[in-house]
């Protein structure tokens, strides 16, 4: 099963132009799964993010205007059946369990906070681990470099090797990270 996933930070989808651009780019890239962070959409505005090429849309709306919000969309070219979902009421993550082309999978998108990342991610990864079934496909904006080795700004004071350790469960063999 080959599935193309795109994860991006939208920096707000309240503008009709930005929503059209998002869906145009998603369709043109032939992605099957779209994970969007920082949508800035409130609960009453999420209905504006529907698209015929992505019939399965899950979201955690912004907790406050112009902050957070995530969206996860599954394209019509893959067979998807939802089993369960865990949606953060504060707009930080959405975790979806189901089958994708008859394979058990957990899809998750996360938008990490700008401060206190490690306590947030400890809780998030515990929830993800406890909730997940099958393989896990995770995308998101961690708001912190995940890998010190891949961090292009070596002087960054925000490098957090413990985040990498949280993701991998303490060992590189337990997870594959694609940046």
Image (spheres, rainbow, N blue to C red):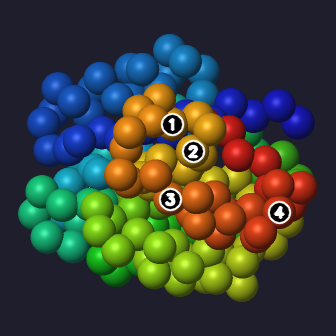
Sequence-first tag of 3 and 2? 2
Q: Is residue 47 left or right of residue 135?
A: left
Numbered badge on residue 64: none
The residue under label 1 is 151
- Residue 39: x %, y % from top left: 27, 50
Q: Nearer the viewer, residue 33 or 116?
A: 116
Q: Is residue 55 left or right of residue 12?
A: right
Q: CA distance from mark 3 to mark 2?
A: 7 Å
Q: CA distance from mark 1 to mark 2?
A: 5 Å
Sequence-first tag of 4 and 1? 1
Name the secondary structure under disc 3. Answer: loop
Name the secondary structure under disc 1. Answer: loop
Sequence-first tag of 4 and 2? 2
Q: Is residue 100 left or right of residue 115?
A: right
Q: CA distance from mark 3 to mark 4?
A: 15 Å
The residue under label 4 is 171
Sequence-first tag of 3 and 4? 3
- Residue 140: x %, y % from top left: 49, 50
Name the secondary structure under disc 4. Answer: loop
The residue under label 3 is 160
Q: Residue at (74%, 62%) from the top-left corner?
A: 168
| Occupied quadrant, residue 24 | top left
The residue under label 2 is 148
- Whether label 4 touches label 1, CB < 8 Å: no
Q: CA distance from mark 4 to mark 2?
A: 15 Å
Q: Which quarter of the rendered picture does the C terminus lie within?
A: top right
Q: CA distance from mark 4 to mark 1?
A: 19 Å
Q: Which quarter of the rendered picture does the N terminus lie within?
A: top right
- Badge 2: few (under 14), some or many (20 or more) residues near its Cα, within 10 Å? some
Q: Measured along the vertical axis of the image, is residue 71 above or below residue 127?
A: above
Name the secondary structure under disc 2. Answer: loop
């Amino acid at each position: 099963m080959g599935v193309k996933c795109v994860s991006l930070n939208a920096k707000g989808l309240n503008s009709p132009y930005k929503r059209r651009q998002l869906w145009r780019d998603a369709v043109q890239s032939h992605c099957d799964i779209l994970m969007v962070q920082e949508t800035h959409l409130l609960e009453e505005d999420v209905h504006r993010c529907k698209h015929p090429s992505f019939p399965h849309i899950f979201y955690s709306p912004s907790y406050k205007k112009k902050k957070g919000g995530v969206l996860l969309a599954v394209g019509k070219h893959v067979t998807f059946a939802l089993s369960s979902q865990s949606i953060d009421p504060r707009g930080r993550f959405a975790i979806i369990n189901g089958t994708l082309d008859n394979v058990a999978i957990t899809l998750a998108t996360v938008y990490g906070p700008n401060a206190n990342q490690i306590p947030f991610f400890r809780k998030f990864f515990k929830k993800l681990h406890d909730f997940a079934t099958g393989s896990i496909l995770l995308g998101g904006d961690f708001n912190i470099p995940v890998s010190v080795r891949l961090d292009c700004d070596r002087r960054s004071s925000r490098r957090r090797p413990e985040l990498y350790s949280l993701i991998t469960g303490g060992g590189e063999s337990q997870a594959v990270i694609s940046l």
